[in-house]
Amino acid sequence: MIETGLRLMTGGEAVAEAMRQIDPDVVPVYPITPQTPIIQGFAKFVADGRARAELVNVESEHSAMSAAVGAALAGARTMTATSSQGLALMAEVVYIAAAMRAPIVMALGNRALSGPINIHCDHSDSMLIRDSGVVQLFAENAQEAYDLTVIATRLAEHPDVLLPVLVCQDGFTITHSAEPVTLLDDEAVTEFVGGYSLPHPVLDTARPTTQGPFAMPDYYFELRRSQTEALEAALAVFGELSAEYEELSGRGYGPLEAYRLEGAERAIVALGSSAGTIKDVVDDLRTDDERVGLLKVVSFRPFPAEEVAALLAEVSSVIVLDRADSPGGAAPLHAELAAALYGRGNELTGHVYGLGGRDLHPEDVRRIFAGEAERYVGLRGEPCPV
Amino acid sequence: MPELTTSNALRVGGVVVPGEAERPRTGGWRTGVKPEVDLSKCVNCLLCWLYCPDSAVVLDGTTFTGFDLTYCKGCEICAEVCPVEAVTMVPEETAP
């Protein structure tokens, strides 16, 4: 079967195809909306003999992540997928996976955390594990979800990194929406991702090791710091791998995407699928000679603060859009921008939008650029402007 | 006190290879009782060696020789499983 060329598929299907091509050894996973199409598609590939993975049907996401840590450290290329409450249930083990430096690629279909229970997109699940030490990359569309999954495999397993990498795609907006996607040849992906190797695999019986040792006050701090350094190193490694991937695919990535920031007086900073809507509005407003632009953050963790500040140096008004709230404090992306731009003279404002899957319409983005939007965009009863 | 390793010199993920651990003397956490053996009763069945959760039963080849109190935590499992009552737990303060 020909797998290359432009095909119509959802983000979930595109990531399932990426997983088939990457051909991981072990995939422990538990279904949850809106991630389910990813693992449903991949499970069919396994059932049809088109992927070799040991698909482990676990009883919960806590077990899925625990099995993933064991498999990855044993020496098996390991992937999993989840959303929302599933990631919340995994969270305890996500921290441990990062600390044990288990290079697990995790496909995340972003979904609001309960309660009230909801199945639609926001980024509160990602933000729940913001400080776990994992890499978090945000896709804008199905194509990016596919490409970032392939790149993430190399990134997770890079000897300077060795950390879990989450490839985040907005639930339903990307996971369930069909759009044209270009896949690489199977052989090209096989060659790009290469073999799997770890410095100390558990099953190397010739060199036995203790993994996940107890660390008292005399070592815990040093181990946490070495883990942080690995996460920081992921920024440069992601850049290098993206350049290599661009040669292969013609599609370039980086920790950030600057969209029409040249000469921009006002710029929105955002994560995920909303970037597509914002780009359309930027194009419209630019046609009317409004000097506006977009800074899309692909790598939320590690956060490229210096590059953000450099790209926004000439932008007088910076508007941050968060699809997650931090009750009682600054929203997560807004807080990052406040830190990155501190003392640099940019005017900084922020909005929270789209919680629980509420749409962000082009008209909302126009109101945001015009300074006429509420702090909580589209919230009924919210006074405006900010 | 051994010299502590710096952050950048640690193995990835804090992995420890044989011979590198600092061997903390966990016997210092003992419950207040310690095992004593009457070797004249011991039948060398090695059940205590099999059950000891701290590998604190010392063998010479396959022959029981005694307990390593550097690691024994006083859990009393050896005394419980001994089929000939050769092991008894004695209070720490009466130790020789």
Image: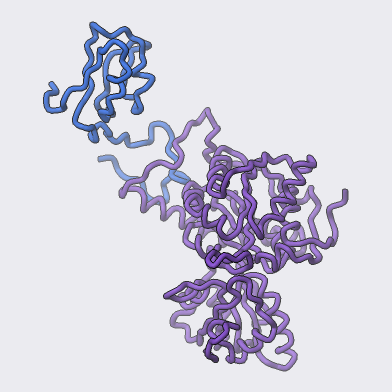
Chain colours: A purple, B blue
Q: Is residue A50 above or below residue A131?
A: above
Is any part of residue A154 visible from this angle? no
At a point 53% along the width and 77% down the height, the residue shown is A309
Q: Is A360 on the left or on the right of B18, as rendered? A: right
Depth check, front residue: A267 or B44: B44
Depth check, front residue: A367 or A99: A367
Q: Is residue B32 above or below residue A4?
A: above
Depth check, front residue: A36 or B7: A36
Quadrant of the rendered image containing residue B46:
top left
At a point 58% along the width and 88% down the height, the residue shown is A373
At a point 71% along the width and 89% down the height, the residue shown is A286
Quadrant of the rendered image containing residue A173:
bottom right
Q: Position of residue A86 (x, y in %)?
A: 57, 55
Q: Is residue A183 above or below residue A280?
A: above
Q: Position of residue A144 (x, y in %)?
A: 71, 64
Q: Is A65 on the left or on the right of A131, as rendered? A: right
Is any part of residue A80 visible from this angle? yes
Quadrant of the rendered image containing residue A376:
bottom right
Looking at the image, the residue that sits furthest to the front is A116
Q: Is A191 on the left or on the right of B3, as rendered? A: right
What is the total number of numbered labels drawn onto the structure image?
Answer: 0
Q: Position of residue A186 (x, y in %)?
A: 79, 49
